[in-house]
Image: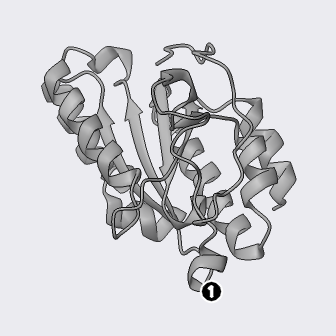
Amino acid sequence: MGTTGAPIGPLFDIPDFTISGVLPPFLGPTPTESALMSPYRTSLTRIAGKLCGSDQRKAIFRGLLAYRQALGGIGLQSGVQWLSGSFAEDIEGLETRHPNDVDVVTFCHRPPAMKNDDAAWQAFVMTNIALINPVAVKAAYKCDAYFVDLDIAPVTVVNSTRYWFGLFSHRRGGLWKGMLEVELPVTVDDADASLVVGP
């Protein structure tokens, strides 16, 4: 995961939905090629162009862009976000409804001054709880959002990643599906994507 927004791998065009109405969990004949497995690293502009064809989807996406801006505004600028849920499915075809939100897990480093200061970090979290608490974030930004601190013990990061990958990469009922990955920090890609969906 980049610390300065530098690319960490190729950007993917977002794959078409499968016959099951989800993103494929991998590209190619088998899931053995790690570079071709979900989550697919992509751009916000690609997401805006591919997944924002309705007013409801555009509103959700604008909420995601605003959430990213808010995270950057408090100094959370180094990491990646995984995007999943009904927003990343053909939920209109599967269930004849619009998505209600986008599922987001933000894997992020602490601001540099708090990297090795747990007390300062806890105080920071409490001060900014409206951007960390899933209920508050969902109400404000249409994001069912969760946060993983990348500066905790590596084994804890691994366990958190295992949990969120397992949860986000399956529909209820067990269907394996793909998800998307976008980088923090906010860049010109955010601005370009906002132009695609409009105000």
Return the residue nearer the eye: 94 or 110: 94
Crowding near the residue tagged with mark 1, few <14, some 14–19, many ≥20 C-alpha atoms within 10 Å? few
Q: How many marks?
A: 1
Q: Report the amino acid beneath label 1.
A: Thr
Rendered view: 61 above or below 73: below
Q: Residue at x 26, y 38 (%)?
A: 162
- Element at label 1: loop
Rendered view: 142 above or below 151: below
Return the residue nearer the eye: 132 or 162: 162
Colouring chosen for the image of the structure: one colour
Rendered view: 144 above or below 178: below
Q: Is residue 20 left or right of residue 45?
A: left
Return the residue nearer the eye: 176 or 189: 176
**Where on the picture, by quarter, is residue 46?**
top right
Q: Quadrant of the C terminus?
A: bottom right
Q: Residue at x 36, y 15 (%)?
A: 112
Quick one: which residue is furthest to the bottom in this view?
96
Q: Is residue 140 left or right of residue 111?
A: right
Q: Residue at x 18, y 36 (%)?
A: 122
* Residue 38 % position (x, y): 51, 38
* Residue 158 % position (x, y): 22, 28
Q: Residue at x 62, y 13 (%)?
A: 6
* Residue 165 % position (x, y): 34, 43
- According to the picture, the residue beneath numbered tag 1 turns out to be 96
* Residue 95 % position (x, y): 56, 83
